[in-house]
Image: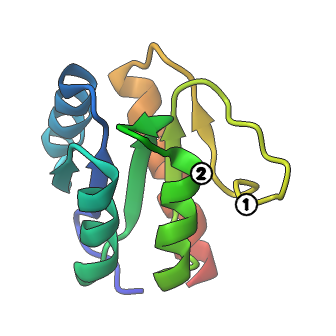
Amino acid sequence: MTHRPYYRIVAADDDPMLLAFVVSTLRDAGHCVFAAYDAEAACELALELDEVDLMITNTRLGTVSARQLVRAVRQGKPHLPILHVGEPLPNPDALLDDVPNLQEPITADALLAAVRELLARRETRA
């Protein structure tokens, strides 16, 4: 992966306040952020945009769970880092083993630290 001065991040949440917080925090840090208010848009953005570096999702996007969204995205981009924001998810089938959880309420510092950690892991694997 080529290192850029910013990362391309898909942020998904059906709570407009939380999504606005995540988007503005990441954009203020210099990242290119694509906002999605539902799982269908999040999945489409994550799979169709070139060079997406990370996806951030909440527990539920309308009628779609984070588990369902992760499964759909991983079919097309199995190594895309994903950060979950919300209550920890049950993980009976190891689908979410590499999806860290950031429990709400979140702060800008905690969000940026989690993003840096996930992207640093990806850089070391590339």
Q: Residue at x 42, y 44 (%)?
A: 57
Query: What residue is shown at x 21% (from left), y 43% (from top)?
Result: 37
Task: Determine the residue positioned at 24% across, 32% down.
Answer: 19
Q: CA distance from mark 1 to mark 2?
A: 8 Å
Q: Is residue 46 visible?
A: yes
Give left or right: position of 35 versus 68: left
Mark closer to the chain start, 1 or 2: 2
User: Does 68 sit above or below residue 75?
Assistant: above
Query: In x, y percent, where is residue 23?
Result: 19, 39
Residue drawn at point x = 58 percent, y = 66 percent:
71
88 up-or-down from 26: above or below: above
Q: Quadrant of the N terminus?
A: bottom left
Q: Residue furthest front?
A: 63
The answer to whether residue 22 is above or below residue 3 is above
Q: Which residue is mark 1?
A: 95
Is 63 or 94 nearer to us in this picture?
A: 63
Task: Give the quadrant of residue 89.
Answer: top right
**Whether residue 80 is visible:** no
Name the residue tied to disc 2.
67
Q: Looking at the figure, which quarter contains the C terminus?
A: bottom right
Binning the other alpha carbons within 10 Å of mark 1 as few (below 14), some (14 to 19) or many (20 upward) gives: some
Q: Quadrant of residue 70?
A: bottom right
- The answer to whether mark 1 and mark 2 are in CB contact below 8 A is yes
Left or right of 11 on screen, residue 16: left
- Residue 13, disc: none
Q: Position of residue 31 (x, y in %)?
A: 20, 54
76 relative to 33 in the view: left or right: right
**Amino acid type indicated by mark 2:** Arg
